[in-house]
């Protein structure tokens, strides 16, 4: 490969960091709107943890997170996007205003960057059932599974107390497991919690029993008691993947997410953030919507036409040789895609 070929292979209009639902959707939009787009993705992430998919209209329960993501990756590559399994170690603006994106394996340049890096749920200590089989992190996704079932919430902070009370909308049997920790929720929350039929259990867990199908059956406690649960939620906080955003000078919110406007624009020109790493509900349809809006906003910044009157006055009218404005690589992919061929 010549130096020019190498430069072409690593030069993009849009670099998306993170290949979950948010980043893949941003890439789908920027690609189908004509821009060379690369998705740089370490893999894993929250969507990959789903044993089943809930709340995504048109996607059935039996589709796992990994199956869902594989379909999405194939979809964007068919439209002409580039997907690389790689970890982004740094992003900075270079001298000519473009972004330099460093990864473990390579280096890329891009005009615009979309950060879709998500977060990691803090995982409690064992004994624990399998995630999705009695251990859950997403109330909006999984509360429906526990209607009229015995449920636990694990944790000792504000969010644990609130989720325990929220679960009373779905079942009358909710325990809040402190696991030997002192509660850190406020006095008002304490008063509120005590006024709801939630059983607060102080003791640490000593064991866990599973059913034959792998689902949680019960927890054993230090005092020798055994309590049966179908499942529950662990509420120990989130570790937002904001290192790259902070390196670029993006503002964060008080809760540690990346601060964005309604189209995913951060305070840094040309840098967008979407999905779980931004404020809002942590749900695939929301992440998809945010990815779509940021993809559209990036397109509006990048598209060639219409030229403004100032540009026409300075450079003359647009000629037939100037059009179409679509990138040659995406043009080739779109033609190969064959819309309207048969
Ligand atoms: C167990 C579980 C079950 C869930 N079930 C559902 C459900 O049924 N329905 C629903 O709507 N929602 C569900 N959710 C929530 C849903 O998964 C998230 O809201 C959604 O995945 C957010 O998408 P995202 O693209 O922002 O982040 P993610 O899906 O977390 O993707 C982020 C990606 O960024 C990558 N990344 C991070 N940093 C870097 C870097 N520096 N370089 C390269 N790549 C990087 C990660 O590796 C990952 O691939 C569930 C969550 C969990 C934890």
Image (cartoon, rainbow, N blue to C red):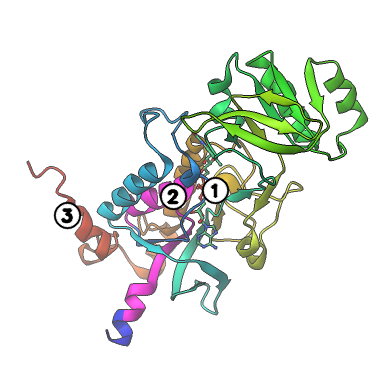
Q: Nearer the viewer, residue 228 or 173?
A: 228
- Residue where numbered disc 1 is placed: 274
Residue 224 in the image, given as x and y percentages of width and height: 77, 30
The answer to whether residue 89 is above or below residue 231 is below
At a point 53% along the width and 46% down the height, the residue shown is 46
Q: Nearer the viewer, residue 21 or 207?
A: 207
Q: Is residue 19 left or right of residue 271?
A: left
Reply yes or no: does residue 2 show up in magenta. no
Q: Is residue 39 left or right of residue 318?
A: right
Asked if labels 1 and 2 touch by Cβ distance under 8 angstroms, the answer is yes
Q: Label 2 to label 3, Cα distance in Å?
A: 21 Å
C-alpha gap between disc 3 and disc 1: 30 Å
Q: Which quadrant: the N terminus?
A: bottom left
Q: Label for residue 335?
A: 3
Label 3 vs 1, first from the N-terminus: 1
Which x, y percent locates residue 231? 60, 28
The secondary element bearing badge 2 is classed as helix
Does 15 lie within the magenta span? yes
**Whole-number angstrom distance, CA of label 2 to CA of label 1:** 8 Å
The vertical placement of 310 against 66, above or below, is below
Residue receiving disc 2 = 26
Q: Residues within 10 Å of mark 1 (few under 14, many from 20)?
A: many
Foreground: disc 3 or disc 1: 1
Are dots 2 and 3 in contact, CB under 8 Å?
no
Q: Is residue 98 visible?
A: no
Query: In the rendered structure, which disc, 2 or 1, sits on the residue that comes first in sequence?
Result: 2
* Chain part drawn in magenta: 6-34
- Outermost residue on the right side: it is 187
């Amino acid at each position: 490969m010549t130096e020019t070929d190498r430069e072409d292979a690593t030069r993009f209009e849009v670099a998306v960091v993170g290949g979950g639902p948010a980043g893949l959707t941003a890439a789908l939009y920027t690609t189908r709107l004509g821009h060379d787009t690369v998705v740089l993705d370490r893999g894993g992430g929250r969507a990959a943890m789903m044993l089943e998919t809930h709340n995504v209209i048109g996607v059935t329960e039996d589709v796992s997170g990994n199956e869902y993501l594989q379909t999405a990756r194939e979809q964007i590559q068919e439209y002409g996007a580039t997907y690389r399994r790689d970890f982004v170690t740094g992003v900075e603006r270079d001298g000519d205003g473009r972004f330099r994106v460093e990864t473990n394996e390579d280096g890329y340049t891009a005009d615009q960057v979309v950060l879709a890096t998500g977060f990691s749920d803090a995982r409690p200590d064992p004994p624990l059932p399998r995630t999705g089989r009695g251990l859950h992190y997403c109330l909006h996704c999984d509360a429906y599974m526990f209607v009229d079932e015995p449920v636990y919430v694990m944790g000792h902070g504000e969010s644990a107390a609130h989720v325990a009370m929220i679960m009373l909308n779905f079942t009358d049997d909710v325990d809040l497991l402190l696991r030997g920790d002192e509660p850190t929720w406020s006095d008002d929350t304490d008063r509120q919690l005590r006024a709801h039929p939630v059983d607060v259990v102080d003791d640490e867990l000593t064991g866990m029993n599973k059913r034959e199908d792998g689902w949680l059956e019960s927890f054993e406690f230090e005092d020798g008691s055994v309590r049966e649960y179908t499942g529950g939620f662990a509420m120990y906080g989130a570790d937002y993947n904001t290192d790259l955003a902070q390196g670029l000078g993006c503002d964060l919110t008080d809760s540690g997410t990346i601060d964005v406007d309604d189209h995913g624009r951060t305070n840094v020109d040309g840098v967008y953030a979407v999905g779980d790493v931004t404020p809002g509900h942590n749900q695939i349809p929301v992440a998809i919507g945010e990815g779509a809006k940021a993809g559209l906003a990036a397109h509006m910044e990048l598209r060639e036409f219409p030229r403004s009157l100032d540009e026409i006055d300075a450079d003359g009218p647009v000629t037939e040789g100037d059009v179409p404005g679509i990138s040659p690589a995406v043009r080739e992919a779109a033609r190969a895609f064959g819309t309207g061929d048969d």
